[in-house]
Image (cartoon, helix red, strand yellow):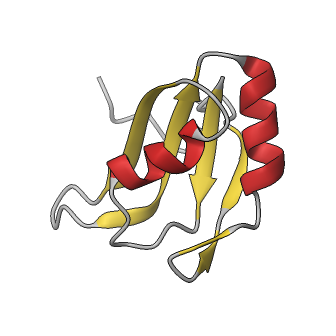
Amino acid sequence: MNIYVGNLHFDLSEDELKKVFEEYGEVTTVKIITDKVSGRSRGFGFVEMVNDDEAREAIENLNGKDIKGRKLNVNQAREKENNSGRNNRFRS
């Protein structure tokens, strides 16, 4: 299951985030989204877990949990909508 994690502290590393989620089960990938120009964290990311039951438990237990002074916003990631609300008439 792919999990959205928001309100991350800007200094939190992917390894630190992985350790938080590994308390609930096997984590396959962790990706903190960064600004393309500055390389700085944008304050959110995604965690992929193998087992859906473990993922749901992680979501339930970690949503609202304080990590480095910030309360996490954790829920199942939604599929990315394809260019929603954008005018694509100039794109080839």
In the picture provided, is 17 more to the left or to the right than 51? left
Front-most of 48 and 90? 48
The quadrant in which the C terminus is found is top left
**Residue 61 at what x, y percent from top left?**
79, 52
Identity of the residue drawn at 55% across and 37% down: 22
**Residue 79 at what x, y percent from top left?**
64, 28
Query: Dividing the picture into quarters, in which one does residue 53 lie?
Result: top right
**Residue 38 at what x, y percent from top left?**
16, 67
Identity of the residue drawn at 21% across and 55% down: 36
Identity of the residue drawn at 46% across and 51% down: 17
The quadrant in which the N terminus is found is top right
In the picture provided, is 45 more to the left or to the right than 59? left
Q: How many marks?
A: 0
Task: Pick out the residue farthest to the front.
Answer: 23
Front-most of 6 and 62? 62
Task: Pick out the residue farthest to the bottom.
Answer: 69
Figure check: 37 above or below 2 = below
Identity of the residue drawn at 51% across and 66% down: 8
**Residue 11 at what x, y percent from top left?**
33, 72
Front-most of 1 and 15? 15
Figure check: 12 above or below 33 = below
In the picture provided, is 2 more to the left or to the right than 61? left
Q: Is residue 73 visible?
A: yes
Q: Is residue 85 visible?
A: no
